[in-house]
């Protein structure tokens, strides 16, 4: 998953170590997320976004991927599931 962590982190003058300390993760974990080798849990993504005073969507760019999407596999092809967000 693509992200803007490095850009935002450097803008605030934070090291990977310091960002990790702020969110309860190791420097290695922050590096792996930043370099797109690891995808964070939703809670860690939320905590990272909070450090930057951003929404998760402003920090992480979710791309549609047939390989990673489990919705169609677990629920069948469509089964009448509406694809738009239900919150208005």
Image (cartoon, rainbow, N blue to C red):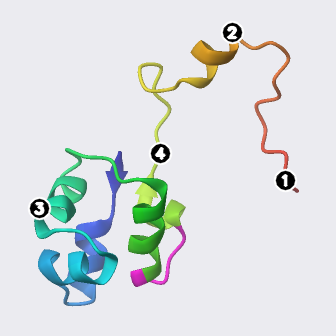
Identity of the residue furthest to the front in this view: 24
Residue 34 falls in image quadrant: bottom left
Judged left or right of residue 16, residue 47 is right
Label for residue 87?
1
Q: Residues within 10 Å of mark 2 (few under 14, many from 20)?
A: few
Residue under label 2, please give it.
Answer: 77
Label for residue 62?
4
Residue ID at (24%, 69%): 25
**C-alpha separation, residue under disc 4 versus residue under disc 3:** 22 Å
Residue ID at (13%, 78%): 17
Q: Quadrant of the N terminus?
A: top left
The earlier-in-sequence mark between 1 and 2 is 2
Q: Which label lies toward us, 4 or 3? A: 3
What kind of element bears circle 2? loop
Judged left or right of residue 48, residue 7 is left
The earlier-in-sequence mark between 1 and 3 is 3
Q: Cβ–Cβ below 8 Å for labels 1 and 3?
A: no
The earlier-in-sequence mark between 2 and 4 is 4
> Magenta segment, which residues?
51-55
**C-alpha separation, residue under disc 2 versus residue under disc 4:** 21 Å
Q: Cβ–Cβ below 8 Å for labels 4 and 3?
A: no
Residue 30 falls in image quadrant: bottom left
Q: Which label lies toward us, 2 or 4? A: 2
Residue 61: x %, y % from top left: 44, 51
Q: Residues within 10 Å of mark 4 (few under 14, many from 20)?
A: few
Q: Cβ–Cβ below 8 Å for labels 4 and 1?
A: no
**C-alpha separation, residue under disc 3 versus residue under disc 2:** 38 Å
Residue 18: x %, y % from top left: 18, 84
What kind of element bears circle 3? helix
Residue ID at (23%, 81%): 21
Residue under label 3, please give it.
Answer: 28
Residue 38: x %, y % from top left: 25, 46
């Amino acid at each position: 998953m693509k992200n803007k962590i490095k850009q935002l982190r450097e803008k605030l003058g934070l090291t990977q170590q310091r960002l990790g300390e702020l969110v309860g993760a190791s420097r290695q974990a922050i590096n792996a997320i930043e370099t797109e080798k690891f995808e964070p849990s939703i809670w860690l993504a939320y905590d990272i976004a909070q450090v930057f005073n951003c929404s998760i969507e402003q920090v992480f760019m979710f791309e549609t991927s047939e390989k990673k999407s489990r919705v169609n596999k677990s629920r069948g092809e469509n089964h009448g599931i509406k694809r738009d967000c239900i919150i208005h």
